[in-house]
Amino acid sequence: MSHTHGHDPHHSGHGVFDDERVALMIGAEGESAGPLTAEAIERATAALRGGRDDVRRVADLGCGPGVEACALATAFPAALIVALDGSPAMRAAAQRRVGEAGLSARVEVGAIDLDGDLSSLGAFDLVWTAQALHHLRDEAATLARVAALLRPGGVLCVLERLDPAELVASDDLGRPGLWERVAGAQAAWHADRSASAPATGLEGYAALVGEAGFGVVDSGPLRSVATLEGSPGAAPLVARYVQGALRNLTDRLDPADIEALRALDGGGSARVSHLEVRQSRTLVIGRAPGA
Ligand SMILES: C[S@@+](CC[C@H](N)C(=O)[O-])C[C@H]1O[C@@H](n2cnc3c(N)ncnc32)[C@H](O)[C@@H]1O
C-alpha cells in the first residue's frame, strides 16, 4: 500500500510555501489554532517518561512560520527547539516571530528537506510535525527516518488537518448567515470529495506511526474555535477561503451569496477586522521503544 496521497510533489511540495503572503496566512492560521496546539502539547507531555524540565531537544519538522516552535519553547523551558523548514520565506517568518517573542536563544531555525536524509540532526526527546507530512513524497519513509532521531522512550507528535478550516468574519457582507452557509457548503463539498479520494485519516496516520516503529500511545481528533483580531494574516486567510468557495462551492450556494463573495474577492477583504477560525486536526502520539 502506498502511503503517499498521489499529490504532484511540484505542486504540493514546499515550493508553494515559499511566499511571504502564504507565510503570513499560515502564521494567522497557527495563531488561531493556539488552543488546539496547547492541547496537543499537553498530551505529548503526558506521553513523555520524564517531566517538562527533562526535555532538552525538540524538533519541529516543517515548522512553517514558527508559531508552534514558540509554543514548544514556552512549554519546555529547558529545551532547545530546532525548527526546520524547506522554504526560505517560512524560515524568515519563523526567525522574525522567534525574535519578537524573545526566544532566539532557545529556538534555532534551520533549513531541511524532509524528503531527504535527516541523520545529521542529532537526537531529540520530542519530535513535533504539524501539517507537513502529507506534503512529502513518502510519509512512511520520512517517519522511519524520524524514528531514528528519537532518544529511547522519546515522543513523536503528529498533527494533520482533519476538516478544512471554517471562517466566520465580522462583516456578513449584508447577507446574514453568509459564513455559516459557506461553512455548510464547504463541509458537504469536502465530504463528497473525501468519499471519492480519501486522504490519510486518523487511522491511517496511527498505522503509519506504528509501522515506523513507534508505540501509538494516544490519538484522536482535536478541534478549536478561536478569534483573530487585527492579525496581519487575517485578510489573506479570508481571501484564500473566499477564493476556495468561489472555485468549489458556486453550485452549492445562493447566487446572491456568490455575488457577495465575488465583491469581497474584488478587494474587500481588508474590511475583515474580527475573524472566528474553526479548525480541526488529527493527533497521533507515538513513543520510541526503550528506556
Ligand atoms: C502547512 S505548513 C505547516 C506549518 C506549521 N507546522 C503549522 O502547522 O502551521 C507545511 C510546511 O511544510 C513545509 N514543507 C513541505 N514539504 C517540505 C519538505 N519536503 N521539506 C521541508 N519542509 C517542507 C512547507 O514549507 C511548510 O512550511
Image (cartoon, rainbow, N blue to C red):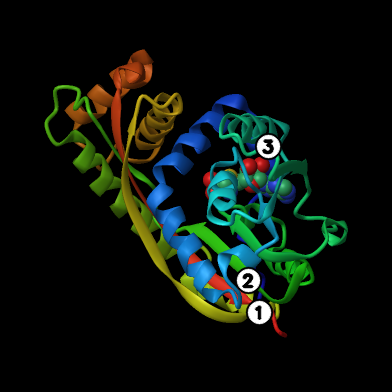
Picture quadrant of residue 277:
top left
x 57%, y 54%: residue? 130
Percent from the top left, x then y, of residue 228? 34, 34
Report the disc number at residue 155.
2
Q: Disc 2 or 3, which lies upstream in sequence?
A: 3
Q: Disc 1 or 2, which lies upstream in sequence?
A: 2
Report the disc number at residue 186.
none
Marks 2 and 3, how far apart in space? Answer: 24 Å
Q: Which amino acid does the dot numbered 3 rest on?
A: Ser
Give the crowd class for mark 2: few <14, some 14-19, many >=20 residues within 10 Å: many
Q: Which amino acid does the dot numbered 1 rest on?
A: Phe
Quick one: SS at disc 2? Answer: strand
Percent from the top left, x then y, of residue 132? 61, 52
Q: Which amino acid does the dot numbered 2 rest on?
A: Val
Quick one: SS at disc 3? Answer: loop
x 22%, y 28%: residue? 170
Residue 237 shows up from this direction: yes
Q: Residue 227 vs residue 25: left or right?
A: left
Residue marked by disc 3:
104
Instruction: Give the residue at the far top of this rendering.
Output: 267
Report the disc number at residue 214.
1
Q: Disc 3 or 1, which lies upstream in sequence?
A: 3
Marks 1 and 2, how far apart in space? Answer: 9 Å
Please, is residue 148 above or below residue 87 in the view?
Answer: below
